[in-house]
Image (tube, rainbow, N blue to C red):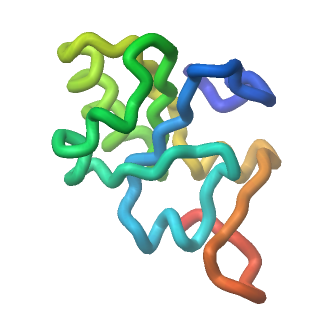
Amino acid sequence: MSVSELPDEFPEGTVLLDVREDDEWEAGHAPEALHIPMGELAGRLDELPENGDVYVICRSGGRSARVTAYLNDNGWDAVNVDGGMSRWAVAGRPLVGEYEGVPPQVI
């Protein structure tokens, strides 16, 4: 699914799952996203909704495609966000960062 196809507001029970590393997340992320780095996912599956859509995003779509396949193979209804946070930022979607005084950015 492309960034432009994502809803502006996610329905209750829907998750935007950001699977990037901590430094990428801290630099800039979608305000409503859930952050679980790809390498930690298997140990944190209990944080995902059992019944609800999971949109998976990374920087460009590679990691999120692998996570999407894994989740779908294990019972979730997951969708890869094509182009990832790079396209998110280009589309003008909101970004927040974790560094005070530093504008959020996608790294």
Image x and y of residue 25, in percent: 50, 63
Image x and y of residue 11, in percent: 70, 19
Q: Is residue 64 left or right of residue 79?
A: left
Of residues 106 and 77, the one nearer the viewer is: 77
User: What residue is shown at x 43% (from left), y 24% (from top)?
Assistant: 49
Of residues 67 and 49, the one nearer the viewer is: 49
Q: Is residue 4 above or below residue 42?
A: above
User: What residue is shown at x 26% (from left), y 22% (from top)?
Assistant: 69
Image quarter where the N terminus lies is top right
Res 61 → quadrant: top left
Q: Is residue 16 above or below residue 5?
A: below
Res 105 → quadrant: bottom right
Which residue, as the protein is rendered here, is positioned at the far bottom? 101
Q: Is residue 103 above or below residue 72?
A: below
Image x and y of residue 103, in percent: 75, 77
User: What residue is shown at x 53% (from left), y 42% (from top)?
Assistant: 84
Image x and y of residue 21, in percent: 36, 63
User: What residue is shown at x 50% (from left), y 16% (from top)?
Assistant: 53
Res 98 → quadrant: bottom right
Q: Is residue 7 left or right of residue 58?
A: right
Of residues 103 and 60, the one nearer the viewer is: 103
The mark total stands at 0
